[in-house]
Image (cartoon, coloured by chain):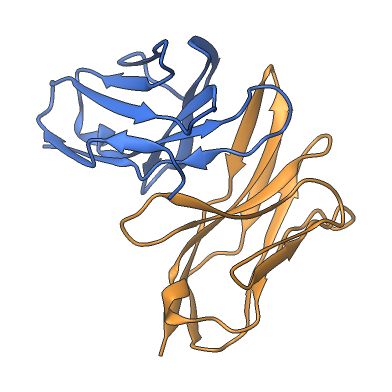
Chain colours: A orange, B blue
Amino acid sequence: GNSVTQMEGPVTLSEEAFLTINCTYTATGYPSLFWYVQYPGEGLQLLLKATKADDKGSNKGFEATYRKETTSFHLEKGSVQVSDSAVYFCALTMFSGGYNKLIFGAGTRLAVHP
Amino acid sequence: DSGVTQTPKHLITATGQRVTLRCSPRSGDLSVYWYQQSLDQGLQFLIQYYNGEERAKGNILERFSAQQFPDLHSELNLSSLELGDSALYFCASSVEAEGVDTQYFGPGTRLTVL
């Protein structure tokens, strides 16, 4: 079946460090891929998305490229800030069985220290 | 702000009780999805409604039910509550049910069952 695998956290970085959170997926067909972020005590916010192979999603300095050949959608940011501390969820959506099924990874907690 | 609203923000109740969670989708969105987020199970899809009709069911218990009203707001009813039902409940909405589209999440309702 369709699934998403993320690197386990927590990821702990110093401010201004480079961030990579790995995400790979298994899907039949051509899913759309998403990164959602959950700040402490808040709901899920859409961070970025990509709908086809080689698309790059970007927002707030974060970016991820849809790589069909490696079935990956790794999240990167060149210089993290303390305010980026949150849980990041990789997800895919497929139209299956008559509805859009959104499948999440387990989430990766990022802690950024000054 | 995603445009999806949920009430109440917090709910504390006792085992055996019944509660109702409310969600208003983004303006123009016809689909509403309900998710449960718990520490041990991660994000679980519960149920989807499209324009007033049930479209898909996920891991929803028989003690739980939902409906979507003509004004498109939705309610999730949880009855005979157990300690294990304590979780964050999210609502999401999207423009349409068919095809691949983006789900936008509300801030969630934190349910605590004592």
Which residue is found at the position 39% from the left and 21% from the top? B73
Give the total number of marks visible in the rendering. Answer: 0
Which residue is found at the position 72% from the left and 27% from the top? A95
The one of B9 and B112 positioned closer to us in this rendering: B9
The C terminus of chain B, quarter of image: top left
Q: Is residue A11 visible?
A: yes
The one of A24 and B12 positioned closer to us in this rendering: B12
Q: Report x, y in % for residue B41.
A: 42, 42
- A18 in relation to B66, above or below: below
- A10 in relation to B56, above or below: below
Q: Is residue A75 visible?
A: no
- A35 in relation to B112, above or below: below
Q: Among all residues in the image, which is located at the extreme front?
A: B27
Q: Report x, y in % for residue B65.
A: 35, 15
- Asked if residue B68 lies left or right of residue A94, the reply is left
Q: Report x, y in % for residue A78.
A: 65, 82
Which residue is found at the position 69% from the left and 18% from the top? A97
- Asked if residue B78 lies left or right of residue A60, the reply is left
Which residue is found at the position 65% from the left and 50% from the top? A34
Q: Report x, y in % for residue A15.
A: 49, 88
The one of A12 and B71 positioned closer to us in this rendering: B71
- Asked if residue A31 lies left or right of residue A53, the reply is left
- A105 in relation to B36, above or below: below
